[in-house]
């Protein structure tokens, strides 16, 4: 992988939770930093969960290790307006200069 392969932009998101007036937990996301990345979007798969159709899209994000420091399982990213949940992280390349993040597109209320 070369730096010239990083032709997309991905935004790292931080998640904060709070409790509303009736005791429900609510989440808010704030943009931390936008970094260059290589993104591969797989074909979406559909499944029925609890009687409702659910679409899942697997997305692989690759970038420089330093740009994704602190990003791991259960972290969130934004790519082209979609929120992504990071499910896995693996160092790749010579001297582990790059990282590969396995992500799933999530619904806005997730």
Image (spheres, rainbow, N blue to C red):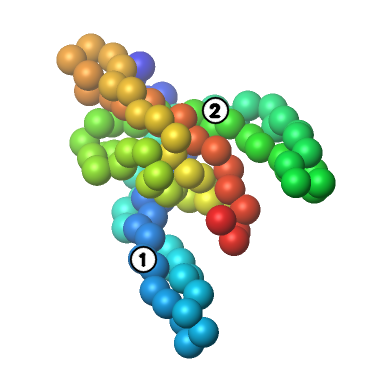
- Indicate the position of residue 16 as horizontal and vertical percent values: 36, 66
* Residue shown at the point (46%, 71%) measured from the top left: 25
Residue drawn where x is 42% and y is 77% of the image: 19
Q: x and y percent of residue 87 in the render?
A: 44, 35
Using the image, determine if residue 98 lies above or below residue 16. Answer: above
Q: In this view of the protein, which residue sits in the foreground, 95 or 91?
A: 91
Q: Is residue 34 left or right of residue 39?
A: left
Q: Residues within 10 Å of mark 1 (few under 14, many from 20)?
A: few
- Closer to the camera, 39 or 102? 102
Report the residue marked by disc 1. Answer: 16
Q: Residue at x 49, y 35 (%)?
A: 103
Quadrant position of residue 40: top right
Residue 28 lies in quadrant: bottom left
Which image quarter holds the C terminus?
Answer: bottom right
**Residue at the top extreme of this rendering:** 94
Work out whether 47 lies above or below 15. Answer: above
User: What kind of element bears circle 1?
Assistant: strand
């Amino acid at each position: 992988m070369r730096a010239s392969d990083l032709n997309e932009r991905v935004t790292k998101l931080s998640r904060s939770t709070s409790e509303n007036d009736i005791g429900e937990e609510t989440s808010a996301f704030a943009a931390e930093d936008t970094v260059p990345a290589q993104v591969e979007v797989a074909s979406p798969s559909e499944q029925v969960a609890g009687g409702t159709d659910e679409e899942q899209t697997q997305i692989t994000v690759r970038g420089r290790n330093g740009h994704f420091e602190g990003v791991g399982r259960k972290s969130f990213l934004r790519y082209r307006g979609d929120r992504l949940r990071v499910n896995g992280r693996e160092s790749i390349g010579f001297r582990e200069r790059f990282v590969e993040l396995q992500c799933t597109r999530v619904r806005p209320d997730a």
